[in-house]
Amino acid sequence: MSQQSVVSPDQIRQRFSRAMSDMYREEVPLYGTLMELVAQVNAQVLDSDPTVAQQLRRTGEIERLDLERHGAIRVGTADELATLCRLFAVMGMQPVGYYDLTPAGVPVHSTAFRAVHEASLQISPFRVFTSLLRLELIENPELRAFAETVLTKRSIFTAQALALIEHAEQHGGLNEQQAANFVEQALETFRWHHSATVTAAQYQQLSAQHRLIADVVAFKGPHINHLTPRTLDIDSVQAKMPEHGITPKAVIEGPPRRQCPILLRQTSFKALDEPIAFSDQHQPHGSHSARFGEIEQRGAALTPKGRALYDRLLNAARDELDDFPNESNAARYNSLMEQHFKAFPDSDDGMREQGLAFFRYFVTEQGLAADHDALKAASLQDLISAKYLRAVPLVYEDFLPVSAAGIFQSNLGDAAQIHYGVHSNQQAFDKALGRSTLDELTLYAETQRRSIAECCKALNLPPLA
Ligand code: OOG
Ligand code: NI
């Protein structure tokens, strides 16, 4: 196969993300409603807030905004996870970060598959939050053995998808026809199934252990359980959801509303109850709820120092609330969050000067017109003060464990408040995955460094630290 005929992984990811969105919209019409609402609110924000519009134009994010979404799946075995890792690699997605959900009573650990370079993210920022069930947390040995048997019997990938993954690995990519086939075949893994692979009684047993265990074990494949568009104003979407027949969860996860958004704010609507035929039924007599809707607003990626401050303030607010945020304490939770987060500077300059967030740097018109010889000894701060460089916060591309726990919980109900006496086990996760996950902080630091290097080049300056 000649080099020219290879479709770039970024293109494959962009096509796959679109195909996934089309499939999900057809299967879950409420997702379509949510997408329309998000598009309306985004258009309003861009109209009414020229600064936001200008910043998105500068970073190029404006072009990816309508494409932007993440999804989530849950798998049952190491083999499934390892093969998914290879499948996502065909689309230029790598596992970033490790999330332990057991402190929240959810028996999984997770990573996010996504593109890692800013140029690739620009073409498609599609991400998939992927969780692996920790079967060892099923206490009843018979039930655990049963779950294992059911999982090892299933094959969640089509034969063609497997062949195309192998082809891409051996030949360095896929051509047009293969890429089109790959998108179609890969999509099959994420499809919803109206029939379960277990009997109604077996489903009940699995579900009694944990609803999530039933969700992973009882079906033919890891159906995509939500797709999340990115909004520029999550409070506005949250407020408008009821008018559109959507009931949002009680509180928005993540930081409080700010002038300069940081990290990630998320809200979701409850999973739908969908008719299911169990393996001992000819018609759907049962039901299962797994699929829901979610929206998110993304802000600045934080440095280790910024993240430590975020975690401290979030924990302080939650400790003071002394309960999981819910309907009855939502107002108090929001006001506690606002109070505590006063300690987090709410301006780009403030965050940059205190080293709390990562930034991308751009040369301004003035910078290009300046006498570059006179700048040889200038520091980064000098160049910014002189308005030769402009700093724009780097967008956070990842997830937050406490928020993810809140999203899981809002869909699993109170029965899910289980306390596992175990700890995170990144080593076991990496082993199942077949490689180690990338550290997101390193990725942000690299993007920041590359942008500074580009500015230096444009200004004819030696590299700046
Ligand atoms: C994943 C929940 C986490 C997020 O956006 O934090 C998540 C799941 O329910 O499988 O999607
Ligand atoms: Ni999500």
Image (cartoon, grey):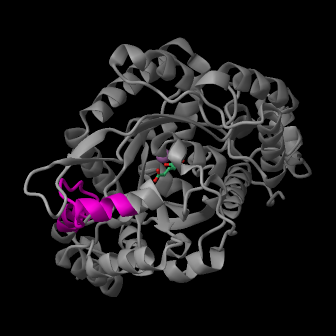
Residue name at image x 67 percent, y 24 percent: 329
- Residue 180 highlighted magenta (yes or no): yes
- Residue 261 highlighted magenta (yes or no): no
Picture coordinates of residue 80 (x, y %)? 38, 75
Quarter residue 420 falls in: bottom right
Residue name at image x 24 percent, y 56 percent: 191
Quadrant where the N terminus sits is bottom left
Farthest bottom residue? 170
Residue name at image x 63 percent, y 49 percent: 400
Relative placement, left or right, of 436 versus 149 is right
Residue name at image x 18 percent, y 79 percent: 159
Could you say which is closer to the camera, residue 133 or residue 392? 133
Tell me which segment is drawn in magenta.
Answer: 179-205
Picture coordinates of residue 389 (x, y %)? 75, 39
Could you say which is closer to the camera, residue 380 or residue 340? 340
Residue 218 vs 320, above or below: the answer is below
Could you say which is closer to the camera, residue 21 or residue 424? 424
| Residue 387 in sight here | no
Relative placement, left or right, of 183 versus 60 is left
Quarter residue 269 falls in: top left
